[in-house]
Amino acid sequence: MHGAIKIFYPLAKVLTYLGGRTSKHKSFSAQVQAVVKNSREQALQRHHRCIEREHLLMSMLEQRPGRIHEILNALGGDIAHLQQKTAEALAAYPRLKPNIYF
């Protein structure tokens, strides 16, 4: 549980920076909604049990142009390398067996 809390708060800050909920906003911005929707689709396509932080990160990295790119470029980050490592982390998650109906 503590690990989930440590992960949630940094992601919440990033999503808020990208236009998420604040005291002035009633709902997430379209950009944040797209990130969450894409993260869900990625988890489903990969047959993962739930949306993990890597799904959210990959979804943010795939949005072009995006503020995450601005932030990473300002920090000297290698976006392609980060995408590769995130994809490797996603590949390591266990896959659920797909339901097959005859």
Image (cartoon, rainbow, N blue to C red):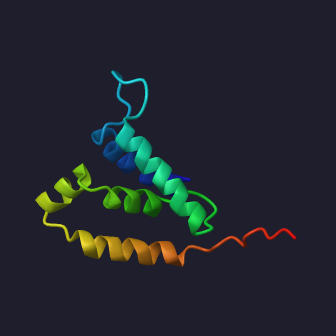
What residue do we see at 23% from left, 54% from top? 65
Q: Position of residue 56 (x, y in %)?
A: 43, 56
Along the horizontal axis of the image, is 93 left or right of 5?
right
Q: Quadrant of residue 13?
A: top left
Residue 41's place in the image compared with 86, above or below, is: above
What residue do we see at 38% from left, 38% from top? 30
Residue 85's place in the image compared with 54, above or below, is: below
Q: Nearer the viewer, residue 27 or 34?
A: 34
Q: Position of residue 68 (x, y in %)?
A: 25, 54
Q: Quadrant of residue 98?
A: bottom right
Residue 86's place in the image compared with 4, above or below, is: below
Q: Position of residue 42 (x, y in %)?
A: 51, 62
Image quarter of the C terminus = bottom right
Along the horizontal axis of the image, is 73 left or right of 47?
left
Q: Nearer the viewer, residue 98 or 82?
A: 98
What residue do we see at 64% from left, 73% from top? 95
Q: Quadrant of residue 41?
A: bottom right
Q: Residue furthest front?
A: 102
